[in-house]
Image (cartoon, rainbow, N blue to C red):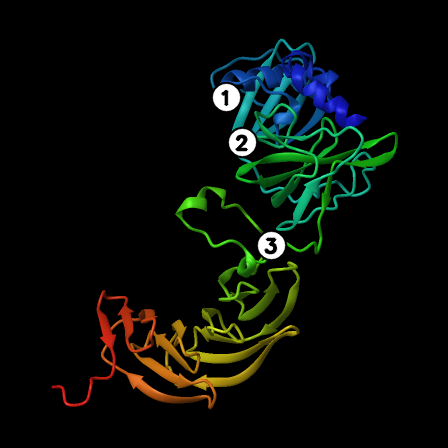
């Protein structure tokens, strides 16, 4: 029922904005004067729900300067009651001083807002629901008797610009959050619904009970990329997000069969995820330093990783994770490019040492070294039949390698 009420109230936003700020929360009435001044400075009418954060304290100041005297200005030397409001909007914190009678409104200063460490929801605040969503997961708008869509807004607040809506059962990806709006005790998440990106509400406490409007899909399978329709010119306009994952900061690659997502972190961790379920299959410390290169074999059963210290590892990929097959030692600097030959039996690695090494993946041995590049080898490419290998370095030199036919010069 609350969801329906909020949906209806969205249609009368202008009326709500006309109310005094004190009517929207438990903030003292003089905060309205600070909001009005800030609205004139930013060029739009602001409500408390538009703010990223706000705090207030009441004081008795030593004079009419309200604790923020302006140079060259004389103030009555009498104690003056008033408020200090810290309003954070669009990443800027505004320090306002307002007298009790609201006749004096002073913007003391403004500066970049400090990074907030406050939890959302605040610990112990029963006015908020307990969030069930997480970053990177798929979720949907709950289907209930109301069958009302969730509005999507430009900022985490009911007065944010309306961008569109997600229908009941509509599936989306969670991009950011949670953010809590203090005035109405709402928990917001930034989501991507088929390209519609904005903030939407997870739910609200009604009569002391949580009323969830969004629900995570958890491990619900998403369409398998390998089994999906091939993307061609005639259907390219239908392309949409099938799944989304939170991976360590570093590099990622997708297996040719679309089943595995491998992620190499700057901390040396290798994470393998199943794209069909969204589940993390396993995480191992692949290298003692940053992972700098990843490559799957054509049949998706092998994975090669390169690192900043010149090491290469060859891994078997199974349903239980990645298990090391061979360490491949030969480079003396960062391994930045890795590629399997179309046959799958040969791996090429390119390094900042200027060399390309060809490895037999069944024996774990180097079978050839290609020299001549003076910069970091940044790109490798085999021809479709595996007869040619293209290499490019950071200096812009490209070489094509192959085996000359017998009897040629």
**Which numbered disc covers residue 168?**
none
Q: Disc 1 marks which residue?
A: 42
The residue drawn where x is 23% and y is 73% is 399
Residue 240, horizontal then vertical, whole percent: 52, 45
Classify 10 Å Cα crowding around label 1: few (below 14), some (14-19), many (20 and above): few
Quadrant holding the C terminus: bottom left
Q: Image check: 114 left or right of 80?
A: left
The residue drawn where x is 52% and y is 72% is 300
Q: Nearer the viewer, residue 255 or 376?
A: 255
Q: Image check: 398 left or right of 32?
A: left
Classify 10 Å Cα crowding around label 2: few (below 14), some (14-19), many (20 and above): few
Look at the image and tell me whether residue 81 can be seen. Answer: no
Q: Disc 3 marks which residue?
A: 223
Q: Disc 2 marks which residue?
A: 90
Mark 2 or mark 3, earlier in chain = 2
Is label 1 in contact with label 2 (beta carbons under 8 Å)?
A: yes
**Secondary structure beneath disc 2?**
loop
The residue drawn where x is 81% and y is 38% is 125
3 or 1: mark nearer the eye: 3
Disc 1 from disc 2: Cα separation? 10 Å
């Amino acid at each position: 029922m609350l969801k329906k009420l909020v949906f209806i109230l969205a249609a009368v936003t202008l009326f709500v904005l006309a109310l005094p700020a004190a009517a929207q929360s438990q903030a003292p009435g003089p905060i309205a004067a600070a909001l009005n001044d800030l609205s004139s400075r930013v060029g739009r009418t602001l409500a408390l729900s538009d703010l990223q954060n706000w705090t207030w304290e009441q004081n008795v100041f030593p004079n009419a300067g309200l604790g923020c005297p302006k140079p060259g200005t004389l103030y009555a030397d009498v104690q003056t009651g008033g408020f200090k409001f810290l309003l954070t909007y669009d990443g800027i914190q505004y320090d306002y001083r307002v007298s009790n009678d609201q006749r004096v409104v002073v913007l003391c200063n403004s500066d970049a807002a400090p990074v907030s460490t406050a939890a959302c929801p605040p610990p112990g605040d029963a006015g908020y629901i307990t969030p069930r969503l997480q970053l990177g997961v798929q979720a949907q708008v709950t289907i209930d008797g109301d069958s009302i869509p969730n509005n999507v807004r430009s900022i985490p607040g009911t007065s944010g610009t309306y961008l569109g809506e997600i229908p009941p059962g509509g599936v989306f990806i969670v991009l950011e959050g949670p953010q809590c709006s203090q005035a109405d005790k709402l928990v917001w998440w930034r989501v991507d619904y088929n390209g519609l990106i904005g903030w939407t509400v997870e739910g609200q406490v009604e009569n002391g009970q949580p009323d969830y409007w969004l629900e995570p899909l958890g491990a619900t399978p998403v369409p398998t990329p390998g089994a999906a329709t091939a993307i061609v010119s005639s259907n390219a306009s239908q392309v949409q997000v099938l799944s989304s994952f939170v991976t360590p900061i570093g590099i990622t690659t997708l297996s040719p069969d679309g089943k595995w997502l491998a992620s190499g972190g700057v901390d040396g961790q290798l994470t393998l995820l199943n794209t069909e379920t969204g589940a993390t299959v396993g995480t191992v410390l692949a290298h003692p330093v940053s992972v700098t290169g990843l490559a799957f074999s054509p049949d998706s059963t092998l994975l090669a990783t390169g690192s900043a210290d010149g090491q290469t590892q060859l891994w078997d990929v199974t349903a239980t994770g990645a298990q090391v097959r061979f360490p491949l030692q030969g480079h003396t600097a960062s391994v930045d490019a890795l590629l399997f030959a179309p046959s799958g039996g040969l791996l090429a690695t390119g390094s900042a040492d200027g060399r390309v090494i060809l490895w037999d993946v069944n024996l774990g041995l180097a079978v050839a070294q290609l020299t001549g590049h003076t910069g970091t080898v940044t790109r490798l490419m085999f021809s479709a039949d595996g007869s040619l290998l293209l290499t490019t370095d950071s200096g812009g030199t490209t070489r094509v390698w192959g085996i000359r036919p017998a009897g040629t010069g």
